């Protein structure tokens, strides 16, 4: 079983089968839906998927597609075709995204050419790229990458304008 959820922890889900055909979708609709250069999606049959905490809101992104997201924090969580027996979870929302490596690309008509150069870019860790005074103040409010008890509530920081 694989588990996942949103950034704030209000929504959690479980996959009771391994994803089949994890892929990167570069179509313009997926780019906008996840706010990134592509969507990484892991499909499972709807019979092997369950929401285990909370209920998502749904955005109908076209006449044939639905996308579920957290109404609290906005995390995009799923993509599905209306009436399909399949649902795709966003790979980044899995607790162990490394367990769902992509096997194909779709929507390549909108693939950004600069993606080919990513491996050659300089790279550093978060700790190395964040000023030490900022790291010293860091207190994460993100849900941990594992299921938590039913009475778990997220820590909230001060609200900033």
Image: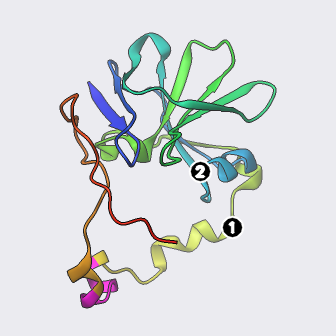
Residue 55 percent location from the top left of the image: 47, 26
Q: Tell which of 114 and 89 is nearer to you.
A: 89
- Kindly state the secondary structure of the residue where label 1 is placed: helix
Residue drawn at 25 percent across, 68 percent down: 139
Q: Find the magenta span and give its range.
A: 127-133
Q: Nearer the viewer, mark 2 or mark 1?
A: 2
Q: Is residue 133 visible?
A: yes
Magenta stretch: includes residue 128: yes
Residue drawn at 76 percent across, 24 percent down: 64
Q: Which residue is mark 2?
A: 34
- Kindly state the secondary structure of the residue where label 2 is placed: helix
Residue 124 percent location from the top left of the image: 33, 81
Magenta stretch: includes residue 74: no
Residue drawn at 26 percent across, 24 percent down: 1
Residue 83 percent location from the top left of the image: 67, 12
Image side of residue 15 versus residue 45, left or right? left
Q: Tell which of 35 and 153 is nearer to you.
A: 153
Q: Is residue 101 visible?
A: no
Q: Which residue is mark 1?
A: 113
Callout 1: 10 Å neighbours few (<14), some, many (20+)? few
Callout 2: 10 Å neighbours few (<14), some, many (20+)? some
Image quadrant assignment for residue 81: top right
């Amino acid at each position: 079983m694989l588990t996942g959820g949103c950034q704030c922890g209000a929504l959690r889900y479980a996959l009771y089968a391994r994803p089949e055909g994890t892929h990167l979708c570069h179509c313009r609709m997926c780019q906008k839906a996840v706010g990134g250069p592509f969507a990484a999606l892991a499909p499972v049959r709807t019979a092997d998927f369950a929401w285990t905490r909370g209920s998502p809101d749904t955005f109908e992104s076209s006449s044939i597609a639905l996308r579920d997201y957290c109404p609290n924090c906005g995390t995009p969580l799923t993509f599905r075709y209306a009436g399909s027996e399949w649902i795709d979870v966003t790979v980044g929302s899995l607790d162990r995204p490394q367990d769902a490596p992509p096997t194909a690309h779709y929507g390549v008509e909108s693939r950004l050419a600069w993606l080919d150069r990513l491996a050659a870019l300089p790279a550093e860790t978060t700790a190395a790229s964040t000023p030490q005074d900022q790291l010293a103040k860091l207190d994460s409010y993100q849900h941990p990458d594992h299921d938590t008890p039913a009475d778990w509530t997220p820590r909230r920081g001060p609200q900033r304008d």
